[in-house]
Image (cartoon, rainbow, N blue to C red):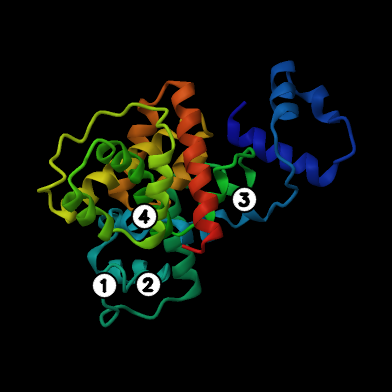
């Protein structure tokens, strides 16, 4: 049975017959019955699936929408972006756009929903439990900030053997106090993973270039911590990110196969999620 159908049927059972032993089993094959029984979801709320075309688009980064505007006539593109409140982000003007009627807005939202193939992905509320699901509540900017912190693990590996105090001072002063605090935490812990060295000269590299390299490394760590997670969770996270980072994220998730590595990276990620949440970063 299609995973989406399994989840929705499980929700329907939770809502309309929660105390039964799933009497629908008589209409299902043994394999289908086991799929539904084993699907870990407690929600009985039908709202996510009924409102998915209109509600889910609000969490999609505008760059994914921007890439789809060419599917609409040019004259309608400002109206499409306005329908989902993205006119300012897409640098579109509404001067030439007609007022958006509720019917037109509904049409544009439904069409974007179709173009994004959102109907083949479960709403976040129906995903199996995971400690990483709460990232779907984070804004793109917060996840990018989290990725920067993950890159500090690679920085720690690079600066451990450095004795040049001027080079270290240049790096330390470029960090926020909380980033510096996390870097010191990384330095005091033995790194459990071996990533390829950055192959840079920390005494001469520009801070901007260093931060870009560390962000890329952080994105790799972030991505590979999602290996083995539900495909629809991966899809949702990718679409909270901008289209550039989102595509790299999906690619890197697929490259990660080592369960031990994934476990270590996921623990680093969860620690930072809690650290950033606790410190209101």
Q: CA distance from mark 4 to mark 3?
A: 44 Å
Residue for badge 3:
49
Which corner quadrant holds the N terminus? top right
Quick check: 74 above or below 242?
below
Tag 4 residue: 180
How far is mark 1 from mark 2, CA to CA?
Answer: 9 Å
Determine the residue located farthest toward the right in the rendered image.
19
- Tell me the residue at 37%/48% (across/down): 183
| CB-based contact (under 8 Å), mark 1 and mark 2 | yes
Q: Could you tell me how far apart the alpha carbons at marks 1 and 3 are, in whole angstroms?
A: 31 Å
Q: Give the structural element (helix, strand or loop) at label 3.
A: helix
- Asked whether residue 116 appears in the rendered view, the answer is no
Residue appearing at x 46%, y 76% in the figure = 101
Question: In the rendered image of this protein, does residue 75 appear above or below residue 61?
Answer: below
Mark before the other along the chain sequence, 1 or 2: 2
Q: Residues within 10 Å of mark 3 (few under 14, many from 20)?
A: some
Horizontal and vertical percent for residue 63?
31, 57
Please tell me the numbered disc located at residue 92.
Answer: 1
In the rendered image, is residue 33 in sight?
yes
Give left or right: position of 254 versus 35.
Answer: left
Select label 4 or label 3 by which is in front.
Answer: 4
Q: Secondary structure at mark 1?
A: loop
In space, the residues marked 2 and 3 are separated at their CA atoms by 24 Å
Give the number of the disc on residue 148.
none
The answer to which of marks 4 and 1 sits earlier in the sequence is: 1
Image location (x, y in percent) of residue 78: 30, 71
Q: CA distance from mark 2 to mark 4?
A: 41 Å
Mark 2: few, some, or many residues within 10 Å (few <14, many ≥20)?
many
Q: Nearer the viewer, residue 64 or 175?
A: 175
């Amino acid at each position: 049975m299609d995973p989406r159908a399994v989840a929705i049927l499980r929700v329907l059972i939770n809502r309309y017959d929660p105390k039964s032993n799933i009497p629908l089993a008589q209409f299902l094959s043994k394999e289908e019955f086991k799929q539904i029984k084993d699907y870990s979801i407690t929600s009985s709320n039908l709202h996510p699936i009924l409102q998915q075309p209109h509600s889910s688009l609000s969490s999609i980064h505008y760059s994914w929408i921007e890439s789809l505007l060419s599917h609409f006539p040019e004259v309608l593109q400002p109206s499409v972006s306005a329908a989902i409140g993205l006119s300012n982000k897409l640098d579109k003007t509404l001067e030439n756009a007609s007022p958006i009627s509720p019917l037109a807005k509904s049409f544009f939202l439904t069409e974007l929903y179709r173009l994004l193939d959102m109907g083949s992905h479960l709403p976040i509320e129906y995903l199996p439990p995971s400690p990483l699901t709460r990232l779907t509540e984070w804004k793109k900017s917060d996840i990018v900030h989290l990725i920067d912190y993950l890159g500090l693990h690679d920085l720690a590996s690079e600066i451990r053997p450095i004795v040049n105090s001027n080079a270290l001072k240049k790096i330390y002063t470029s960090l926020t106090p909380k980033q510096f605090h996390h870097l010191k935490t990384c330095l005091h812990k033995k790194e459990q993973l071996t990533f390829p060295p950055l192959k840079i000269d920390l005494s001469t590299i520009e801070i901007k270039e260093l931060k870009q390299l560390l962000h890329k490394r952080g994105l790799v760590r972030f991505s590979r911590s999602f290996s083995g997670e539900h495909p629809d969770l991966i899809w949702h996270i990718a679409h909270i990110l901008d289209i550039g980072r989102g595509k790299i994220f999906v690619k890197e998730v697929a490259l990660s196969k080592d369960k031990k590595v994934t476990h270590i990276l996921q623990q680093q990620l969860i620690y930072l999620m809690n650290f950033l949440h606790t410190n209101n970063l």
